[in-house]
Image: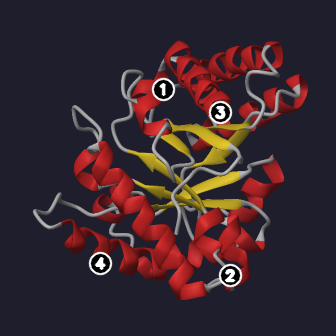
């Protein structure tokens, strides 16, 4: 499979974890939406999304509708059931009703701290697809091995488990976020050649398992200590469709700079 980039959209997204009040979130969304409205040509072909805390989703989607900026809002998790006796959980059906476009699932913190299993992730993937939203399915090995093939075998298993409850025709509606656990919260992202090998492997594996060259067109993005300094090089990796940013994007100006970098990469294609 050729790893040359196709002329398709680049993703620039951020998940805030448990940060920012509702008021702080609203100010951020307003500023970002204003930037996008003033720079429509610059963001052409770029999918910008923000995943705030649950409490800020309603105000965020209202602002986006009012400003009509094209910004997409996501959620950091969901339950696999639409409704019922699941105290403390959030229904993906209710998220859809609020105007959510993406739901992040399977993040390393959910798996480690809250004991989320591959089966739970698979059920959530299916529920999100059923409600016409896009899952951002996070996968990643826990440690950087001496032999990358160990990591690749783990990624294959984890990804196939996450996709196991959906029809293969729906895989194209999943955004795969490759986030090596050892790079999350680290001082630097994973090495560029390492990322390139992992993403090429994932695409080839999807082609092999599901046919029709589906892996070539699959949306695969990278997350894990993306900074304003590293974003451009990561975006330029052949076969990478975008960046999924954490703490560096809590500053709206830094995030806007990353969007500008993605625009520069698009112009080089």
Sequence-earlier tag: 2 or 3: 2
Residue visible at 67% across and 22% down in the picture = 26
- Nearer to us of marks 2 and 1 is 2
Whole-angstrom CA distance, mark 2 to mark 4, is: 22 Å
Q: Is residue 81 visible?
A: no
Whole-angstrom CA distance, mark 3 to mark 1, is: 20 Å
x, y percent for residue 42: 74, 21
Sequence-earlier tag: 2 or 4: 4
Whole-angstrom CA distance, mark 3 to mark 4, is: 32 Å
What colouring style does the render use?
secondary structure
Residue visible at 56% across and 53% down in the picture = 4
Whole-angstrom CA distance, mark 1 to mark 4, is: 31 Å
Q: Is residue 132 visible?
A: yes
**Quadrant hosting residue 59:** top right
Q: Which residue is mark 1?
A: 249
**Along the horizontal axis of the image, is 181 left or right of 32?**
left
Residue 222 in the image: above or below residue 246:
below
Asked if disc 1 and disc 4 are in contact, CB closer than 8 Å, the reply is: no
Which residue occupies the foreground of this view, 94 or 163? Answer: 163
Whole-angstrom CA distance, mark 2 to mark 3, is: 26 Å
- Nearer to us of marks 1 and 4 is 4
Q: Residues within 10 Å of mark 3 (few under 14, many from 20)?
A: many
x, y percent for residue 265: 58, 31
- Nearer to us of marks 2 and 4 is 2
Q: Which mark is residue 153?
A: 4
Sequence-earlier tag: 3 or 4: 4
Q: Which mark is residue 266?
A: 3
x, y percent for residue 95: 73, 54
Asked if disc 2 and disc 3 are in contact, CB closer than 8 Å, the reply is: no
Q: Which residue is mark 2?
A: 212
Which residue occupies the foreground of this view, 154 or 100? Answer: 154
Residue at disc 3, secondary structure: helix
């Amino acid at each position: 499979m050729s790893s040359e980039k196709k002329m398709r959209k680049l993703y620039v997204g951020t998940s805030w974890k448990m940060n920012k009040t509702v008021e702080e979130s609203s100010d951020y969304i307003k500023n970002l939406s204003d930037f996008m409205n003033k720079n429509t040509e610059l963001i052409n072909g770029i999918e910008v999304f923000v995943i705030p805390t649950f409490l800020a989703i309603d105000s965020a989607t209202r602002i986006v509708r009012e400003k009509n900026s094209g910004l997409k809002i996501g959620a950091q998790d969901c339950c696999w059931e639409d409704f019922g006796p699941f105290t403390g959980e959030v229904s993906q059906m209710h998220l859809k009703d609020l105007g959510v476009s993406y739901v992040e699932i399977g993040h390393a913190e959910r798996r480690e701290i809250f004991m989320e299993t591959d089966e739970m992730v698979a059920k959530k993937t299916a529920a999100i697809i059923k409600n016409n939203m896009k899952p951002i399915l996070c996968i990643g090995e826990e440690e950087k091995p001496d032999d990358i093939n160990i990591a690749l075998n783990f990624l294959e298993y984890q990804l196939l488990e996450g996709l196991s409850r959906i029809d293969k025709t729906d895989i194209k509606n999943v955004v795969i976020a490759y986030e090596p656990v050892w790079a999350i919260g680290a001082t630097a992202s994973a090495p560029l050649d390492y990322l390139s090998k992992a993403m090429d492997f994932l695409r080839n594996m999807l082609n092999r398992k599901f046919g029709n060259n589906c892996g070539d067109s699959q949306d695969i993005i990278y997350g894990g200590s993306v900074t304003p300094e590293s974003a451009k090089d990561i975006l330029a990796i052949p076969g990478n469709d975008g960046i999924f940013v954490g703490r560096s994007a809590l500053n709206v100006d830094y995030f806007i700079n990353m969007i500008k970098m993605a625009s520069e990469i698009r112009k080089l294609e």
